[in-house]
Amino acid sequence: MKTAILVFPGTNREHDMAAAVRSVSGKDPMMVWHAETEIPQADLIILPGGFSYGDYLRSGAIAARSPIVADLLEKAKQGVRILGVCNGFQILTETGILPGALMRNAGLTFICKETKLRIERDDTIFTSSYKKGQVMRCPVAHHDGNFFADDDTLKMLEDDGRVLFRYCDAAGQATPEANINGSRNNIAGIMNARGTILGMMPHPENLIEDLHGGLDGRGLFESLLEKVA
């Protein structure tokens, strides 16, 4: 099993992701600089969080035009597993790999805290270590995490079961109060139609060890890395 982590100017969570991959798989991932034109053979490609290019223009907009993205698009077509977290999710929408857009948080403030997510499915390569309806804790740190899609796209995502994570309260209810950034339908994470690509705003890589205060995020990496072992 090989994992590649894409690094852009302003990325700052690549080492958190590497630690998560190493902790679960026992193997070091490859770091791939954005100026490269080819991603080495990998079973899993990760786009980590941060502020690529300082979030100028739109978050992820400049990174989506980096040289490495042409091969990322090709790998996506081939069915390679891809995980984009926070800025990585923003880049995936800016490239068109995933639908929708990440806009400014509804409160127009940077949010850095722990939130709760409801697992919408447990039959995917990203969530098989969880139970459907389970509530997990997960840190967030973003200014542009407000997921938006037009009505037709939103209906398609919901009807096709492509929403994997939803902001919720402790009881698992997706209430307006639990919707920390204004995302439509409390959406925190979506996948592509083939179920091989996930984009999510919260940071599961920051809750995978007891020293982090819990293990809630570890299940995502155990699900994913087990599937590509």
Image (cartoon, grey):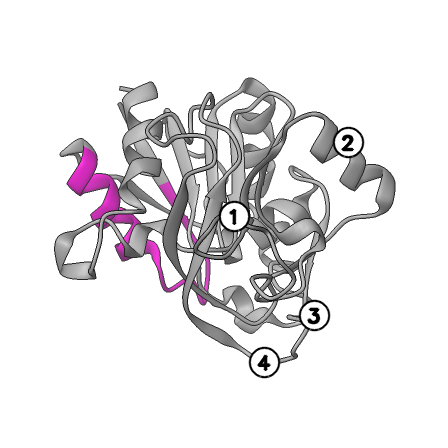
Task: Read off the residue under disc 4.
Answer: 109
- State the residue at coordinates (38%, 55%): 138
Please name the amino acid that badge 1 sits on: Met
Q: Is residue 172 visible?
A: yes
Q: Earlier in the sequence, mark 1 or mark 3?
A: 3
15 over 76 or under it: above or below? below
Element assignment for label 2? helix
**The C terminus is located in which quarter?**
top left
Q: Is residue 228 visible?
A: no
In this view of the protein, which residue sits in the foreground, 28 or 138?
Answer: 138
The residues tagged by marks 2 and 4 sit, at their Cα atoms, a distance apart of 30 Å
Please name the amino acid that badge 3 sits on: Leu
The residues tagged by marks 3 and 2 sit, at their Cα atoms, a distance apart of 28 Å
Q: Earlier in the sequence, mark 3 or mark 2?
A: 3
The residues tagged by marks 3 and 4 sit, at their Cα atoms, a distance apart of 18 Å
Give residue 57's mark.
3
Task: Read off the residue under disc 2.
Answer: 156
Neighbor class of circle 4 (other Cα within 10 Å; few <14, some 14-19, many 20+) is few
User: Horizontal and vertical percent for residue 195?
Assistant: 55, 24
Q: Nearer the viewer, mark 1 or mark 2?
A: 2
User: Horizontal and vertical percent for residue 205?
Assistant: 31, 51
The image quadrant of residue 45 is top left
Q: Nearer the viewer, mark 3 or mark 4?
A: 4
Q: Earlier in the sequence, mark 3 or mark 4?
A: 3
Element assignment for label 4? loop
